Amino acid sequence: MKRLLVLLLLLTVAPAHCLAADETQPLRREDFAYGMELMVSGNNAIYSLTLPAEVYQGCTRPDLGDLRVFNAHGPVPHLLRQPQAEQTAKPAQDLPFFPLTERSSTSNGGSSLGIAIASNGTLIAINAGGAEKPTQAVSAYLLDVSSLQHFPDWLELAWQRQGGEQFSASVHLESSDDLNSWQYVASAALAELSFGGHKLLRNRIELGQHAAGKYLRLSWPSGKDGVSLSAVKAGYESETRTQPRTVLTLTGQPDATASAGRATWLYTTDGVFPVDQLNIRLPEQNSLAEFAVSSRADEKGQWQRRASLLAWRLTVNGVNLDNGTLHLAPTTDRFWRLETEASGSSKAPSLELGWLPGQLVFMAQGEGPYSLAYGRTGLLPARSQVDQLIRAVEPVSGGTLIEAAKAGAQTVLAGEAALLPKTELPWRVWLLWAGLIAGVLAVGAMAWKLFREMEKK
């Protein structure tokens, strides 16, 4: 009886022990599809890397959980985090502005320009001397930004026009500190158009990051009779990204299953990019179309509606106009679809998807060299306390806790073999089931033996 119990224990425990031992085997770089060398300088304890696009194309999980960092002997702790956006609470402000006629805005023309400036640099009044007529066309506007604590990121204009005429103009801005020397700041296309029940309004001018000055001079084409500036607002960006956005430009393929009267194109990103911005570029000039945008994670999934976008590409009075970028809720879907009403053109529009690369933070633990490995089906995300360490140490580190690392070129490790789904049943699972079945048989044998002994008594 005792021997039977020992045999039963061995049959049930040994397979489970073998299975658990295999599950806890340390990972190797060769277990992943792709890898990159991580180059670090200095003796910092923690390094960071902005993830290249190849990582998003090689990983199988949307959360990049099948990614690991290795030193010369094995994995090291790491953390994946998204770039933080800096929110600003600066409201837009109205700017004082002064019209300049064709004669008053130039240095030659026989007229004098009287400008009154307060002690703090603020413009009080502008008076064009000479026999100026009030009906003369305005060729420029002088904007006073001297009262602002910070130079604005953008200007938003409002204008008045007579009748129902369309309006479009190409303007440029110059800046100055003394109203004598002017430097170029930016150019923009302004428009207020209506067609086919749709309205187009473009009234914002984006200013450069390095622009500065107390005064701005806005050119205003004199041929726009009946259009005058009525208000100017200066504003600031509501958020600042930690690094530039990356843009994927995709070429679409016609969808053979599209409904009658509809034109549909399909796009593939070939990666788990965290897309949060899109734009549609029409292939032909002077065209307009409204698109339904959908996406899905895999080829068998249901399409999810993401947005509707009115796209246009127009040339009005020599000014090129196109639709702006649309912001989305972040998604890592690989497959995208554009759908619109069928038209005479069969050319596919270009789909531009914008995304912000994540940041990899890892500890320089152990002996180098350090490397990044990614792409392995069925691997769960690693647990790490690096984020707790950063929150505890970063406030007192003086901004020197984390140093930037560089990534080398992508290399193939296990390749596509690491990306294939594991459909075969491992031998350890067979061994475990064999042990369990043997245990059941052993228990049955014990019960039968006890029954026979009780019958003899």
Image: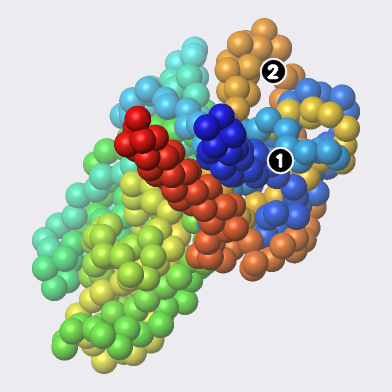
Q: Which mark is residue 268?
A: none
Identify residue type, mark 1.
Answer: Pro
Height in image: 420 above or below 12?
Answer: below
- Colour convention of the picture: rainbow
Residue indicated by mark 2:
399
The residue located at (78%, 38%) in the rendering is 74
Mark 2 and mark 1 in contact (Cβ < 8 Å)?
Answer: no
Q: Which mark is residue 26?
A: 1
Q: Quadrant of residue 25?
A: top right
Alpha-carbon neighbours of circle 1 within 10 Å: few (<14), some, or many (≥20)?
few
Looking at the picture, tell me which residue is in the foreground, 212 or 92. 92
**Mark 2 falls on what kind of element?**
loop
Instruction: Give the CA separation, mark 1 to mark 2.
Output: 34 Å
Q: Is residue 114 visible?
A: no
Decide if residue 375 is in sight here. Answer: yes
Query: Toward the viewer: 7 or 44?
Result: 7
Residue 422: give x, y in percent of width and height.
54, 62
* Left or right, residue 119 beside residue 310: right
Identify the residue shown where x is 29% and y is 80%.
264
**What residue lies at 73% left-to-right and 37% top-to-bottom?**
75
- Residue 64 or 318: which is nearer the viewer? 64
The first of marks 1 and 2 along the sequence is 1
Amino acid under label 2? Answer: Gly
In the image, residue 253 above or below residue 379: below
- Residue 99: x and y, percent? 35, 42
